[in-house]
Every structure is written in C-alpha cells, then in structure tokens.
Image: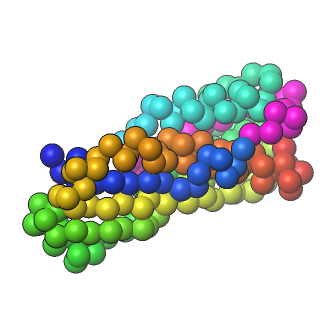
Amino acid sequence: MLMGCVISSYRPLLNETPFDPNVQQDRNLSYFYYAGSTISHSYDTELLKQVLEEYFTQNTIVASVPPERDLYVRVYQTRSPRSPTIFENLSQFSLTVIPYYCDAVKYIVDYELFIDTVLKKTYRYEIREKSLNWIGALLFFWVNFLTNHQSNAFTATIHQFIRDARNEGLL
C-alpha cells in the first residue's frame, strides 16, 4: 500500500548520456560488479554486461581480480549514507497522510579503471532520486510508469563512465 503512495524519478537521464556506436573498441575487457550493502540487483549486472558488450566488441569477462594484461573495471554501487529527516519519519509515521518530498542521492556508483593491474583512475557518479511520498499520490501511481527508473539511471552512469574515460584517453 505505501509503495503505491510514492511517485519517484531517478537521474541521470539516459538521453543525457547517449551511446555513440562510432566509439566501439576491439579490445578485451574484464569487469567486476559489487552492489555494496544494497540488495544485489541482478538486472544491474545484466545492464552492465550488455552496455559493455556494446562498446567492447571482444570478450567482456566477469572477473574478481584484474588480469595481468588489458583493461579491467571494478564497479561498486552503494546506497548513499543518508539518515531520514524528521519530516520523512513524520510522514512514514502518519502512513503518508502528511506528504514528504525528497530530492537526494540514492546510490553512488564508482568505476575503478585498471590497465595492466594498475589503477589508473576512479570515476564516481551519483544516482539521484526525487520522490513524493503522500497518500494522495496513490491516485497517480501510474505516473511512475512514465518516469525515469533506477535501472535507466544506472545505464546512464555506465555511458558517462565510458565517455569520460575515453575523453581522458584511458579507453
């Protein structure tokens, strides 16, 4: 019931970080994904693999340690350490009769890029969530189908990472 009282959207938007098919590379890439203290998102693992395979035309391999040669990306997605505010607690205590609006960082995604086992750079991106928690929002729960979802925001961070690393000459 309470989940139907939330309208939320995530950033960055996928259309803000489009994939450029002209930048594909004929290289191997090993990667590792860790969901941190969050519940393991198997769809995030699949999204990561899918986007990396679009960019790297050779093998993309899941590996827990960097290979001695070639590229390796270690991806950490963790929940942002944020304590609920008094207004958020008040809203939850009132079963969302009292509305609450939140605009905060929900997840932090770190991409550590290794080349030949040497850490070259760590890229950090935030996934922000804007949400309205209110019993009256139950009538408009369908708006959630039109908003940007967490998985789209995660995919956008992958595109940002590839673009930023490429601009710096590391990919």
Q: Nearer the viewer, residue 62 or 57?
A: 57
**Would you place residue 106 above or below residue 3 in this image?**
below
- Pinpoint residue 154: horizontal percent, then vertical percent: 55, 45
67 with respect to 134 (left or right): right
**Residue 154 appears left or right of 168:** left
- Above/below status of 82 relative to 71: below
Query: Residue 46, how many percent across, how many down?
Result: 54, 29
Residue 114 belongs to the span the image colors magenta: no
Look at the image and tell me in which quarter the C terminus lies: top right
* Image spot of residue 128 (x, y percent): 49, 60
Q: Which residues are magenta?
A: 19-38
Report if residue 107 is visible in the image: no
Of residues 130 and 51, the one drawn nearer to the viewer in this rendering: 130
Label tally: 0
Residue 26 in the image: state x and y as whole percent: 87, 27
Kindly identify the residue that appears in the image at 87 percent across and 35 percent down: 22
Check the image and name the residue furthest to the bottom: 86
What residue is drawn where x is 84% and y is 48%? 166
Horizontal side of residue 68 vs 88, given as left or right:
right
Relative height, residue 27 to residue 73 (above, below): above
Q: Nearer the viewer, residue 75 or 143?
A: 143
Residue drawn at x 13%, y 65% is 97
Q: Quarter-wise, where is residue 30 in the image?
A: top right
